[in-house]
Image (cartoon, rainbow, N blue to C red):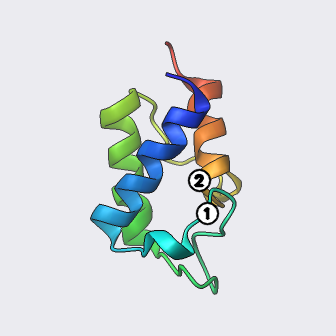
Amino acid sequence: MNETEIKVKLKDFICSTLGVEAEVLENDTELFGDSPIGLDSVDSLEIISFVDGEYGVDMTGVGKEHFVSIDTIAAYICANSAN
């Protein structure tokens, strides 16, 4: 699976499971903190679980710089995937 496909799946997951409006979510949109998206630590656990189940990549304990946006999460998956 290429990085573009991963980004599409991540966006779909974030919108459908975490309730983020697709219109405000771009690949480079900041996901956590004071951003308009404003995800929290519980949401990060949902993302970790999704990434592990979908791609077999464990993100537990990974630095927050990898959770900034869909772009950074997808890049981490690509860099750490066995596929």
User: Does residue 78 appear left or right of residue 16 in this picture?
Assistant: right
**Disc 1: which residue:** 26
Residue pictured at 34% horizontal, 33% vertical:
54
Badge 2: few (under 14), some or many (20 or more) residues near its Cα, within 10 Å? many
> Which residue position is annotated with label 2?
70
Q: Nearer the viewer, residue 31 or 22?
A: 22
Above or below residue 68? Residue 23 is: below
Q: Nearer the viewer, residue 11 or 74?
A: 11
Position of residue 52 relative to residue 49, above or below, is above
Relative to 4, does residue 23 appear above or below in the rendering? below
Percent of width and height locating residue 24 = 55, 76
Whether residues under marks 1 and 2 lie with C-beta atoms below 8 angstroms apart, the answer is yes
- Quadrant for residue 55, please give it: top left
Q: Residue at x 54, y 44 (%)?
A: 7
Q: Quadrant of residue 57?
A: top left
Report the amino acid beneath label 2. Answer: Ile
The residue sitting at 42% across, 75% down in the picture is 21
Question: Could you say which quadrant of the image residue 79 lies in?
Answer: top right
Q: Secondary structure at mark 2?
A: helix
Q: Position of residue 42 (x, y in %)?
A: 37, 70
Q: Considering the numbered disc 1 on the image, is that residue within a helix, a strand or a loop?
A: loop
Distance from disc 1 to disc 2, alpha carbons, whole Å, reads 8 Å
**Marks 1, 2: nearer the viewer:** 1
